[in-house]
Image: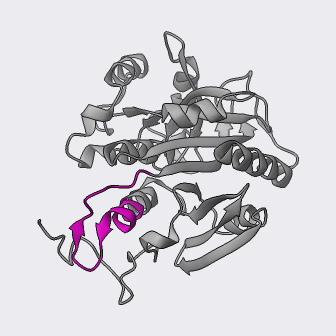
């Protein structure tokens, strides 16, 4: 069996995958990923027991027990570039033998749930509500760097989006990937379901303008107005498309649930950010481990 060379799979002296500093035994089958490294402890405080902790750069990991089930919480930092590191390295940690550098004969499939904050793009989605992403619409271009990327994409949604927005030819192809059906079924009750647009930045890529003008200043309005059958774009964030795309290519189950801290249409912002995040954490832990 072919070996993965040192230049492609970077390991520490302890045979941990480099950036996330993890081995297979450190990682539960149910994994929660969060952007903010301080949010890891916010989640693990609900565990009845914490078995393992590590950190390297922005990647902080706690693995423990909730509702009698093993759960890993891992911080990713911001952006699809960091999701690229985390998903590839989680897969490598659980599916490649670090001693032989070869693929394991039996592959693990992880449940990876991203918990985050987001801005709503529809007026009827209230601040402090929870949006679950039925699809990740990638405005970031990351998945386009991988072979067979189009095989996991909902290209009808992408093509309709390109036509609706007059998508600029110099921008990356807006790939669209569906969430895990089995995870979506656990999270859909009492939440808002829709397409999440993933931007490669916080300012221009999300239509914000300070000193620099956006190439598509009406982007938010175009996102809000998009419809294809029952599909609409509910919110904006910076990680979901890459999580869904890489996860599906590697045969992991992925889902994003975000608490809405701002409604971009109504120009409203939450008055209690911390409480909103706590509600998201508690509800999500219960749903994931049910």
Foreground pick, 48 / 215: 48
Q: Is residue 229 left or right of residue 288?
A: left
Task: Work out whether 277 lies above or below 256.
Answer: below
Instruction: Where is residue 10? Give x, y as percent.
Output: 29, 77
Foreground pick, 65 / 76: 65
Instruction: Where is residue 117? Give x, y as percent.
Output: 67, 47
Magenta includes 97?
Answer: yes
Task: Work out whether 74 lies above or below 241.
Answer: below
- State the quadrant of the C terminus: top right
Task: Work out whether 7 lies above or below 79.
Answer: below
Foreground pick, 216 / 120: 120
Residue at 57%, 32% in the rendered image? 184
- State the quadrant of the N terminus: bottom left
Q: Is residue 272 left or right of residue 48?
A: right
Residue at 51%, 35% in the rendered image? 197
Magenta includes 76?
Answer: no
Q: In which quarter of the image is residue 287?
A: top right
Instruction: Where is residue 233? Give x, y as percent.
Output: 55, 25
Residue furthest toward the top? 229
Residue at 72%, 66% in the rendered image? 44
Q: In the rendered structure, which segment of residues is drawn in magenta?
A: 88-109
Foreground pick, 101 / 281: 101
Q: In this view, does 109 lie to the left or right of 58?
A: left
Q: Is residue 96 visible?
A: yes
Residue furthest toward the left? 2
**In the rendered view, how is the structure colored?**
one colour
Q: Can residue 213 be seen in this view?
A: no
Residue at 27%, 63% in the rendered image? 104
Task: Work out whether 12 lies above or below 47.
Answer: below
């Amino acid at each position: 069996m072919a070996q993965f060379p040192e230049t492609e799979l970077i390991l520490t002296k302890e045979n941990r995958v480099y950036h996330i500093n993890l081995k297979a035994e450190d990682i539960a089958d149910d994994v929660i990923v969060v952007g903010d490294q301080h949010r890891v402890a916010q989640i693990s405080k609900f565990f009845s027991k914490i078995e393992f902790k590590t950190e390297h750069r922005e990647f902080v990991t706690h693995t423990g027990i909730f509702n009698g089930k093993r759960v890993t919480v891992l911080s990713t930092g911001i952006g699809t570039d960091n999701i690229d590191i985390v998903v590839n390295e989680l897969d490598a940690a659980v599916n490649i033998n670090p001693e032989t550098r070869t693929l394991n004969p039996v592959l693990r499939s992880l449940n990876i749930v991203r918990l985050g904050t987001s801005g709503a793009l529809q007026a009827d989605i209230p601040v402090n509500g929870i949006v679950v992403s039925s699809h990740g619409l990638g405005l970031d271009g990351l998945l386009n760097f991988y072979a067979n990327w189009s095989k996991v994409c909902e290209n009808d949604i992408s093509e309709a989006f390109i036509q609706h927005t007059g998508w600029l030819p110099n921008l990356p192809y807006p790939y669209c990937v569906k969430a895990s059906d089995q995870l979506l079924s656990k999270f859909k009750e009492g939440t808002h379901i829709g397409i999440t647009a993933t931007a490669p930045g916080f300012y221009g890529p999300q239509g914000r303008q300070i000193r620099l003008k956006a190439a598509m200043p009406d982007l938010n309005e175009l996102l809000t107005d998009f419809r294809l059958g029952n599909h609409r774009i509910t919110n904006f964030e910076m990680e979901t498309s890459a999580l869904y795309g890489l996860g599906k290519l590697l045969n992991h189950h992925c889902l994003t649930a975000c608490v809405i801290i701002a409604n971009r249409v109504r120009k409203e912002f939450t008055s209690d950010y911390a409480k909103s995040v706590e509600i998201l954490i508690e509800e999500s832990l219960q749903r994931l481990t049910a």
